[in-house]
Amino acid sequence: MATRLDHYRLLGRSGLRVSPLALGTMTFGVGEGSWGSTEDEARAMVDMFIDRGGNFIDTANFYGQLGQSEEWLGRIVKGRRDPLVISTKYSLTTRPGDPNAAGNHRKNMVRSVEDSLRRMQTDHIDLLYLHMWDFRTPVDEILRAFDDLVRAGKVLYTGLSDTPAWQASRMQAIAELRGWTQFCALQIAYSLVERTVEREMIPMAREMGMGVSPWAPLGQGMLTGKYTRADLMPGSMDDINSRKAINAVTGKLTERNLDIADVVVACATDLGCTPAQMALAWTLVNPAVCSPVVGVRTPAQLEDNLGALDLTIPDEVLARLDAVSAVPPVFPIDVLKSPAEGMMFGNVTVAERG
């Protein structure tokens, strides 16, 4: 489904207009190395993204060293901040050893927002995500704290990241019933090597009015074709500058994922595009997906990723990608399809809601 960076989309059940790709800034401020960007590279990527019509930029208070990603971004967009939709996140620790400098609770949320505003030199955050579910904080505390920040004008929109589907849907329903600010965005891992979210999370987001903004749409580099079977070896998290080592330790480097990457490379070759463009364009085919986050390190990588917007994937290629990457259904989805559909609908066809 070809589109353009300046053909904007509504984010979930809101009126907020965002570009069909979001520029991720996790590489900003981590130091030069195999997966860190220099500040000059970061500025060049932001310049390119804005010049092409992109307006959605994603960061987090945890990215970089001591919040440097937000600091760099604040400096880079100074004087042109208003047209942008900047999202940031809170939840992860910013002061190890301090129990209240992490988690989903009100104290950490409010402190994190004040720190993010200062680092980015702005008076408001366009979109604030809960970064990661902590399994500790009551949902009404989270929801009311979000709503208070919105009413104070410090946050305009709210979203969830890496949160169980049942909690996300529960929170959205509570917010709607109580007249509190509802979430308009859900940020989750989604790619050809991570399709388990199609079981519950993506249908939930579509039903509950949250636009999906996938992170790691390239499977953390797995789908670019740069890994081979020779890379199937134990890794070490001590080598933090090696994405290969991190992928090995976290279980991304597997025979299955390499099989998927092989098909992506073959399909990309057939269509005359790069594997990264193929993998990224595939995520945009899903109607629930609003704006994937491109986590690039260099301007050349960003240039390549933007080319995904020019790509229309033929049905036969989509079928080939689906066949190699499909995940087994789980209960209750497996029993709610045929023949159960015939029993529910009397063997007639009943269309789903659009």
Image (cartoon, helix red, strand yellow):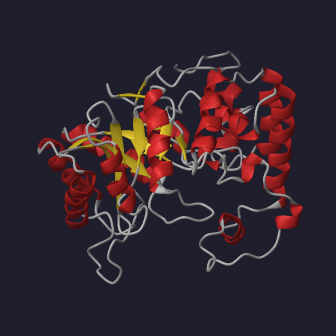
Rendered location of residue 342, percent (x, y): 70, 25
Q: Is residue 158 above or below residue 102?
A: above
Instruction: Give the camera-side residue of 37 and 276.
Output: 37
* Residue at 41% over, 61% down: 133
Rendered location of residue 166, percent (x, y): 45, 51
> Which of the 4 image quarters holds residue 251?
bottom right
Q: Is residue 144 above or below residue 30?
A: above
* Residue at 61% over, 26% down: 309
Instruction: Give the camera-side residue of 52 and 253.
Output: 52
Rendered location of residue 174, percent (x, y): 28, 45
Q: Is residue 286 above or below residue 139?
A: above
Rendered location of residue 62, percent (x, y): 39, 63
Q: Is residue 85 left or right of residue 317?
A: left
Q: Is residue 244 left or right of residue 217?
A: right
* Residue at 48% over, 38% down: 22
Instruction: Give the camera-side residue of 236 and 348.
Output: 236
* Residue at 31% over, 25% down: 15
Q: How many marks?
A: 0
